[in-house]
Amino acid sequence: MNAPKTIFSTELHTGRRALRHRLDDLFAAPRRRGGLPLVCTLLLVSMLGSLVACNAPSAPTVSAPLPTVSFPSLPVTEENRDTRTLYAQVLTTLLDENLLPGEINDPEGYIGTVAEREAMAENQFAVCDVDGDGREELVIQYTTAIVAGMQALIYDIDENGDLRLQFSEFPNLTFYDNGAIQAGWSHNQGLAGDFWPYTLYVYDPESDLYRDVGSVDAWSRDFQPQNYPVDTDTSNSGFVYYVYRDMGTEYGLLSPVDESQYLQWREEYLSGAAELELPWQSLTAEHIQTLTAAG
């Protein structure tokens, strides 16, 4: 997750500069009176700036930095050949016809012209074992659509060898090596400021699906200081958090919590987990062919 960026340094710099100009005006004097007023001005600016900086809260640390794990490049084998062939067919249909399995998207008159195929290359795919079940999945980031039509999809193969949709969300995902996925919301129109709301999913081996374990929104004191719940922000992070375990019934009804409580909830699912760097490729015929090419 991207931590919200601090803006306090910018604000302090701007305020100190304005204060210095103000004091320069107040202490302005003829040259014959010497440099004492200027010395006083500089000392006063330094002291006031230090006092303000001491009272300014630091940017929230929403999670400790985690290592990043990359997937190795795996060759085509007898075990994965059929799966990769099916995945290649899915990707070829998307490239040629702008159609996802189950026709869950609108092709919008797509006919596969050179220009359309070049635009289609903005979409990305990856084939890897993203959930850690020992089988490769097909992950598609479909972004060549209006925001409401953008999708991140994970496909798997069922026991009969048929394609199955395992996961669907907005394409703003962070993957973890314990099977968790952080899915950033498509919009951030609340009080969160630089914090981007998200939903957290964990992989359930029994169902071979992903389970929604909660969603997080926030209130940034800097973004909306009016009525900010200072008493709740015991960490003085400048943020309080709304942790929804059931968005459908709790949204807009829960009181915010301090950062420490939010981090405790998050670490319940992500403690010790490393971010995964998927082997993304642009959606082109050449890249699709590599899925089944020997060597």
Image: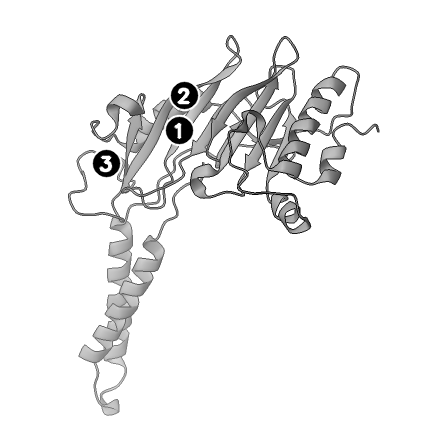
Marks 3, 1: nearer the viewer: 1
Residue where numbered disc 2 is placed:
212
- Residue 80 seen in this snapshot: no
Where residue 36 appears, as percent x and y from the top left, is 25, 79
Residue 180 falls left or right of residue 244: right
Where is residue 23 drawn, in percent x and y? 22, 74
User: Mark 3: few, some, or many residues within 10 Å (few <14, many ≥20)?
Assistant: some
**Three-letter amino acid code at the position of disc 2:** Asp
Q: Are marks 1 and 2 in contact (CB under 8 Å)?
A: yes
- The residue at which mark 1 appears reads as 199
Q: Is residue 117 above or below residue 172?
A: below
Residue 282 lies left or right of residue 167; in this view the side is right
> Which circle's residue, 1 or 2, is located before the other in the chain?
1
Q: Say which residue appears at 38% left-offset and 40% top-offset.
A: 196
Image quarter (top left, top right, bottom left or bottom right) of the C terminus: top right
The image shows residue 68 at horizontal and vertical percentages of: 58, 33
Mark-to-mark CA distance, 1 and 2? 7 Å
User: Residue 233, labelled with which disc?
Assistant: 3
Secondary-structure class at tag 3: loop
Is 196 above or below relative to 156? below
Mark sitting earlier along the chain (3/1): 1
- The kind of residue on which mark 3 rests is Asp
Judge by depth and name the residue closer to the eye, 158 or 63: 158
Question: What amino acid does circle 1 point to?
Answer: Thr
Q: Residues within 10 Å of mark 2 (few under 14, many from 20)?
A: some
Between 11 and 126, the one lying in front of the other is 126
Mark 2–mark 3 Cα distance, whole angstroms, equals: 27 Å
Asked if the residue at tag 1 contacts the one at tag 3, i.e. Cβ–Cβ closer than 8 Å, the answer is: no
